[in-house]
Image (tube, rainbow, N blue to C red):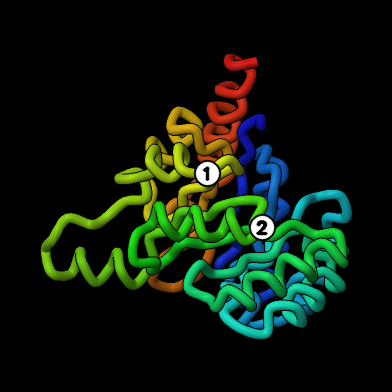
């Protein structure tokens, strides 16, 4: 698939999420993510507001579902989400329920391997159970805790190639990537480039990052999309 740029709206108010999303779309971002903080703060209303403002843009609801899979997926689909996220750590029946709901309501399921004993096995499990995308994810707390101990912070790029090679569905890498690393994700075979903390979101305040964010987003989008044109 052609490279896609997704922005994680890990914010806590609808107004700021809409404002940041408008800037991202102007810069060339393809998909919007209703991040977990936004869903916790605003619930279905956050997804509905994004859908109302951006009727034709794919919207990922980062639910990180662990239980109640069918109901959560159904509710987010009804609010306008096109993609929902279930965790590899969830029970097999929960993942199957999300996949069934996705088929019933016409959305797509993304499986997140965050915290799985081995990331490659988590990705394989998610694909085997019907997930259409893999989110290869090194978590916020894991990264910060390890860095605070003075140890090397893990990166999703560490075993991204192995995850990509292990599955037959598109993969996205998430978790503390620099701009240069995010742009390089398609080189690893991961065409979905996700921009979140700390690139676009202040990881301490969960606010939109300061500085000329729109110009940075535009540059990233141009480079990622150019990678797809070069490989056509």
**Point 20% across, 64% down: residue:** 147
Taking depth in this image into account, of 124 and 39 the one nearest to the observer is 124
Residue at 38% of width from left, 41% of height from top?
Answer: 162
Q: Look at 54% across and 69% down and name the residue there.
A: 87
Q: Which residue in the protein does label 2 denote?
A: 130
Determine the secondary structure under disc 2. loop
Which quadrant is the C terminus positioned in? top right
Position of 131 compared to 87: left or right? Answer: right
Gap between marks 2 and 1 measured at Cα: 12 Å
Disc 2 crowd, CA 10 A, few/some/many (<14, 14-19, 20+): some
Residue topped by disc 1: 167
Mark 2 / mark 1, whichever is N-terminal = 2
Task: Say if 10 sits above or below 54 in the image.
Answer: below
Q: Where is residue 112 in the image (x, y as percent from the top left)?
A: 52, 62
Q: Give the camera-side residue of 23 and 38.
A: 38
User: Would residue 99 appear left or right of 87 to someone viewing this image?
Assistant: right
Cβ atoms at labels 2 and 1 below 8 Å apart = no
In the rendered structure, find residue 122 and report the number of the disc placed on it. Answer: none
* Quarter assignment of residue 48: bottom right
């Amino acid at each position: 698939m052609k490279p896609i740029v997704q922005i994680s709206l890990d914010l806590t108010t609808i107004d700021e999420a809409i404002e940041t999303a408008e800037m991202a779309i102007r810069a060339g971002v393809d998909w919007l993510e209703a991040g977990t903080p936004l869903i916790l703060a605003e619930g279905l209303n956050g997804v509905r507001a994004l859908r109302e403002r951006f009727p034709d843009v794919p919207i990922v609801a980062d639910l990180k579902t662990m239980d109640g899979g069918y109901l959560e997926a159904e509710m987010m689909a009804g609010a306008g989400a096109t993609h929902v996220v279930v965790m590899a750590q969830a029970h097999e029946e929960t993942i199957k329920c999300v996949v069934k709901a996705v088929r019933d309501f016409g959305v797509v399921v993304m499986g997140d391997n965050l915290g799985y004993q081995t990331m490659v096995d988590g990705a394989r499990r998610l694909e085997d159970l019907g997930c259409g995308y893999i989110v290869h994810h090194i978590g916020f707390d894991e990264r910060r805790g390890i860095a605070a101990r003075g140890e090397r912070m893990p990166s999703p790029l560490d075993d991204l190639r192995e995850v990509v090679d292990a599955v037959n569905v598109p993969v996205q890498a998430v978790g503390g990537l620099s701009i240069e690393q995010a742009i390089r994700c398609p080189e690893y075979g991961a065409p979905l480039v996700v921009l979140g903390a700390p690139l676009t979101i202040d990881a301490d305040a969960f606010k939109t990052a300061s500085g000329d964010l729109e110009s940075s987003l535009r540059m990233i989008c141009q480079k990622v999309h150019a990678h797809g044109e070069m490989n056509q």
